[in-house]
Amino acid sequence: MAQESLLQMLEELASKVRSLQSYKRESAARMQALEREKDEAVARAQALERESTELVSLITVAGERVDEILKIGANGDISQPQPVNEPTGSKSPEGLGEFSADPEREAKEHSGKPWRSD
């Protein structure tokens, strides 16, 4: 009887050891996955930091350009745009033709003219 209870206790202990070993393997796999995620997050953070540095640089350059433009404007050196001349040509609407929303009327009016739909 004592031997049976000792054997049963040893079997329970062996089962717990196997369970703990399985838990240890699962924990190690989770730790590796978390390490990979952490490495990816660090890489993303570094990329974002580089991009933000580039943006700051671009904003600085843009600010310097704006300052230059404003200084030129303050000195009155900006040339005024030239007036736009109206194009010469017919101002009568006769040359434009007529448009009808009625397709049958359009077809009748243009029936003598060849029409292609290429």
Image (cartoon, grey):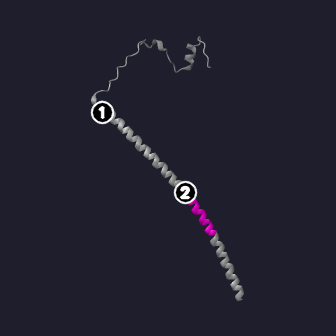
Kindly report the secondary structure that dominates the magenta region of the rendered protein: helix
Instruction: Give residue 56's quadrant in the image.
Output: top left
Task: Give the residue type that dot 2 points to.
Answer: Glu
Confirm whether the magenta stretch covers residue 1.
no
> What residue is at 47 percent from the left and 12 percent from the top?
95
N-terminal of the two: label 2 or label 1?
2
Label 1's element? helix
Magenta run includes residue 36: yes
* Mark 2 to mark 1 CA distance (whole Å): 51 Å
Which of the labelled discs sits on residue 37, or is there none?
2
To which quarter of the image does residue 35 belong?
A: bottom right
- Disc 1 marks which residue? 71
Outermost residue on the bottom side: it is 1
Q: What amino acid type is highlighted by mark number 1? A: Lys
Look at the image and give the residue range highlighted in magenta: 22-38
Q: Position of residue 108 (x, y in %)?
A: 57, 14
Could you say which is closer to the camera, residue 85 or residue 46?
A: 46
Asked where in the image residue 79 lies, by quadrant, the reply is top left
